[in-house]
Image (cartoon, grey):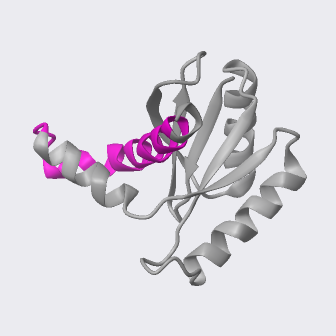
Amino acid sequence: MRILAIDHGTVRMGVALSDELGMIAHPLAFIPAEPFSLFLTRLKQLLKEKEVEQILIGLPRNMDGSYGPAALKVQGFAAVLGESIVTPIKMWDERLTSTQANRFMSEVGVKKHERKAKVDGMAAAILLQSYLDRLSA
């Protein structure tokens, strides 16, 4: 089953895709968040082209596990998205994925000014890989 993960952002939506076996997450380029209609058009293209069977959306939780304003915003986004597509949507804890993505890119030598365009997709890939690892455990 192919799964597409979304790391929600107000400017960019990070996107990652699992392989056909559902074992490895691969970051894709980000999709601009606005206007929403163009985001939705591009997302629908990806869902069709990649034969995606499930969408995983990162749910930002506070470090104590509670939900703050960012989580409420993402839950609203997921609700609107669910009205626009038929692909099942699941929410998954995304605590520290952007921090992990930045740290990883720094360690592999990605220059700071190049990270901005890549961090969202990488954060989505980290989110997706954590979900895939949980499924296989």
Q: Residue at x 47, y 45 (%)?
A: 124
In front here: 24 or 122? 24
| Residue 63 position by quadrant | bottom left
Whether residue 118 is situated above or below residue 37 in the rendered picture = above
In front here: 2 or 41? 2
Q: Residue at x 56, y 76 (%)?
A: 70
Q: Measured from the top left, where is residue 30 in percent x and y?
A: 48, 43
Q: Residue at x 54, y 43 (%)?
A: 131
Q: Is residue 42 magenta?
A: no
Whether residue 23 is situated above or below residue 79 in the rendered picture = above
Q: Measured from the top left, where is residue 72 in percent x and y?
A: 66, 77
Whether residue 1 is situated above or below residue 128 in the rendered picture = above
Q: Quadrant of the N terminus?
A: top right
Q: Is residue 117 magenta?
A: yes
Q: Measured from the top left, where is residue 21 in percent x and y?
A: 59, 16
In front here: 46 or 123? 123
Whether residue 76 is situated above or below residue 87 in the rendered picture = below
Most extreme residue toward the front, as rendered? 137
Q: Measured from the top left, where is residue 42 in percent x and y?
A: 67, 37
Question: In the rendered picture of this protein, how many numbered marks are placed on residues?
Answer: 0
Q: Residue at x 25, y 53 (%)?
A: 102
Magenta stretch prevailing secondary structure: helix
Write down the region rendered in magenta.
108-133
Q: Is residue 19 left or right of residue 103?
A: right
